[in-house]
Image (spheres, grey):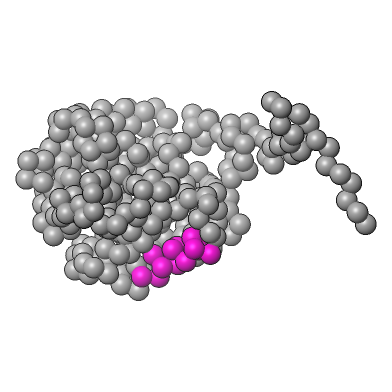
Amino acid sequence: MARPPIEQKEVSGASVPDSYLEYPHRSYGMDHDRYDWSLLVRRKPVAWPNGARVALWVNVAFEFFPLDTPAKPFKALGGMVTSYPDIRHFSLRDYGNRVGVFRVMDALDAAGIGNVTASFNSMVAQRYPYLIDQVNERGWEVMANGVDMAKLHYTGLPAEDEKALVKESLSVLREMSGQPVKGWLSPGRSESWDTPDYIAAEGVEYFCDWINDDMPYPFRTKSGEIVAMPHQHWIDDSMVWLHYKHQEQDFVDQVKDQFDLMYDEAGREGGRIMAITIHPWMSGQPHRIKYLEEALNYVGKHAGVWNATGFDIMQEWKKQQ
């Protein structure tokens, strides 16, 4: 049976089908059906263990930036910027995995922060297996951060290629760490429309790419619900120092201001999450480490702070839903 012709409309002199003006999903808040839109202030308050106000979630990022980073779809923050071979920036990123990381670990120890999530490009684990050993010895959680910082996830990347990247990252990290690896952060925080479906199909239980909330919320995928976690985009040393080019003390001030507000708000509205992201190639520099120490010590000295990994925070939140 022949299909009836598609009715055409004139739009700015061009002929387009009716479907051009149709939305596959229209809803309050955002035009998708991935989650139920809601106001944080109207949700059930969360009570962290031992009466803590704030869950402190520290993420240490282990990244690999290839020398041949492509310019499309874009370069993740920290990607090579000069003509090939950009040895200056390549070796600076390498500095973090060889030198800076140990200063960062010492700073965390001094602040009494022992429960940490380490986000790994799988290429880092393969090139620097001693980092996986260090993380396991400290009891840190391993979170997947794709293959490397040049292999971005985006709409337009063939589905089979993206699925292969997800599988490669998770399988390498699970095998090398011996951990189940239940968390995911996309390189450059870049997703395709289908990335959440692909990671959920591979057993991921929480992901960190969406930055539209201060607390976790359930996120629908084709393989069931996963949890969107508030992995803050702004309290991140590379965002503050490299992207915005703020002064070193500005990072400290922003950590303090963010924590103070969260701590106060939690006293009135229920538990909150304070996420801090640290890049060893940024904070591990000799002239910057004291600023990281100041920020960590400020947060760590407060009573009512529960230091936990992303997976532990997610589990506690889910129990109370």
Magenta segment, prevailing SS (helix, strand or loop): helix
Depth order, front residue of 225/44: 225
Q: Quadrant of residue 180?
A: bottom left
Residue plotted at (43% across, 63% down) = 165
Q: Is residue 5 in sight in this rendering?
A: yes
Q: How many marks?
A: 0
Residue 189 location (% of width, % of height): 40, 47
Say if 64 sits above or below 293 in the image.
below
Residue at the extreme left: 286
Residue 150 location (% of width, % of height): 34, 55
Residue plotted at (32% across, 39% down) = 274
Residue plotted at (18% across, 33% down) = 252
Residue at the extreme right: 1
Q: Is residue 118 in sight in this rendering?
A: no
Residue at the extreme front: 13
Q: Which residues are magenta?
A: 160-172
Magenta stretch: residue 161 in it? yes
Q: Is residue 52 left or right of residue 19?
A: left
Q: Quadrant of residue 96?
A: bottom left
Depth order, front residue of 295/319: 295
Q: Is residue 88 left or right of residue 65?
A: left
Magenta stretch: residue 168 in it? yes
Depth order, front residue of 226/167: 167
Residue 32 location (% of width, % of height): 61, 41
Residue 132 location (% of width, % of height): 24, 66
Depth order, front residue of 299/225: 225
Say if 264 sits above or below 17 in the image.
above
Q: Quadrant of the N terminus?
A: bottom right
